[in-house]
Image: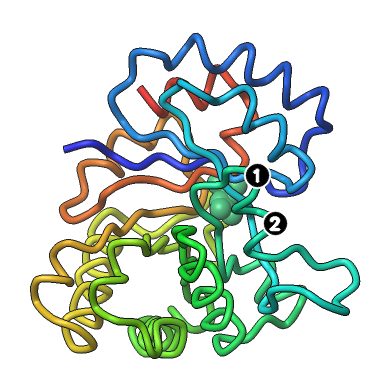
């Protein structure tokens, strides 16, 4: 089955650097069968819309506003991102949850906005180190999922990708063991089953993120029930990211 491999650029690269990156990256992955997705700064969406036509790469934004338009200085809406051909948006990344105090309720509003214009959502969820140490991982993920997906119809889940990213594994070089990830993904599917159905629990796309690199990606992709990877730091090097994709 095709894997869904996402590169999250975060706040990295100027437009010029991104153009150079694509020139190097695209030829390297042109025969790859996996789905490749780039989560890029807003300022790069227009260029992506030109450079990625007729390639096997889709692109999207790293966030959107809870609102559609109006007096929200500094915000970017679902419509603006969609207008530039985005296929998806990330929502609920832990850096936004933490640094901008984004709540599960706001994430729910963003998801509803995204789906209303046919943007898929990569919903990031994950526990902190303290939460894991006190055995609260499942409880935390349950709360994140229940609130973020509140009010969604079951058939909308096909437009949701769940990215399990333990907060303590992001950018740290640390990560849970393969067994722990497998168990957590099982828990995530169980929560989806309780909220929706067995069928949705089996079908929903769940990917793993947090310190993924070219050395550990093969083992991670072998984990039962994992449909792909969300790669931060390691996606900024075109050669390394192409190795992961391949
Ligand atoms: P990392 O980031 O791969 O650098 O740990 C992942 C992410 O934040 O999406």
At a point 73% along the width and 27% down the height, the residue shown is 18
At a point 40% along the width and 39% down the height, the residue shown is 5
Q: Is residue 20 visible?
A: yes
Residue 37 image position (x, y, % from top left): 48, 39
- Horizontal arrangement in the rendering, residue 186 relative to residue 32 (left or right): left
At a point 42% along the width and 34% down the height, the residue shown is 36
- Horizontal arrangement in the rendering, residue 184 relative to residue 25 (left or right): left
Residue 102 image position (x, y, % from top left): 67, 81
Q: Residues within 10 Å of mark 2 (few under 14, many from 20)?
A: some
Choose top left, top right, bottom left or bottom right for residue 109.
bottom right
Q: Nearer the viewer, residue 235 or 90?
A: 90
At a point 26% along the width and 49% down the height, the residue shown is 227
Q: Nearer the viewer, residue 89 or 8?
A: 89
Q: Which residue is mark 1?
A: 84
Q: Is residue 171 visible?
A: no
What coloring was used for the rendering? rainbow
Task: Single out the residue that lies furthest toward the left.
Answer: 198
Point out which mark residue 80 bears.
2
Under circle 1, the secondary element is loop
- Horizontal arrangement in the rendering, residue 69 relative to residue 88 (left or right): right
Q: Where does the C terminus fall, quadrant-wise?
A: top left
Residue 67 image position (x, y, % from top left): 70, 78
Under circle 2, the secondary element is helix
Contact (CB < 8 A) between labels 1 and 2? Answer: yes
Q: Nearer the viewer, residue 219 or 26?
A: 26
Residue 4 image position (x, y, % from top left): 34, 42
Q: Nearer the viewer, residue 151 or 6?
A: 151
In the displayed structure, would residue 117 be above or below residue 223?
below
In the displayed structure, would residue 111 be above or below residue 58?
below
- Horizontal arrangement in the rendering, residue 235 relative to residue 197 (left or right): right
In the displayed structure, would residue 23 be above or below residue 149?
above
């Amino acid at each position: 089955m095709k894997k869904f491999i996402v590169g999250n650029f975060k706040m990295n690269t100027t437009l010029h650097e991104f153009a150079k990156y694509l020139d190097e990256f695209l030829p390297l992955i042109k025969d790859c069968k996996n789905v490749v997705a780039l989560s890029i700064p807003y300022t790069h969406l227009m260029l992506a819309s030109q450079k990625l036509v007729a390639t096997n790469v889709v692109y999207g934004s790293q966030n959107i506003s809870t609102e559609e338009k109006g007096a929200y200085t500094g915000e970017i809406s679902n419509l603006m991102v969609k207008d530039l051909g985005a296929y998806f948006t990330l929502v609920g990344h832990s850096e936004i949850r933490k640094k901008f105090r984004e709540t599960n309720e706001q994430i729910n509003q963003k998801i509803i906005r995204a789906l209303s214009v046919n943007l898929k959502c990569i919903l990031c969820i994950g526990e902190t180190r303290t939460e894991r140490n006190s055995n609260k991982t499942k409880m935390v993920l349950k709360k994140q999922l229940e609130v973020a997906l509140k009010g969604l119809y079951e058939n909308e889940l096909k437009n949701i990708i769940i990215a399990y990213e333990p907060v303590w594994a992001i950018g740290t070089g640390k990560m849970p063991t393969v067994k722990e990830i497998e168990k957590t993904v099982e828990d995530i599917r169980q929560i989806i089953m309780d909220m929706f159905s067995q069928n949705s629990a089996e079908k929903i796309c769940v990917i793993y993120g947090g310190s993924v690199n070219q050395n550990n990606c093969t083992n991670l992709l072998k984990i039962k029930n994992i449909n792909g990877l969300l790669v931060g730091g390691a996606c900024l090097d075109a050669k390394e990211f192409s190795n992961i994709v391949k």
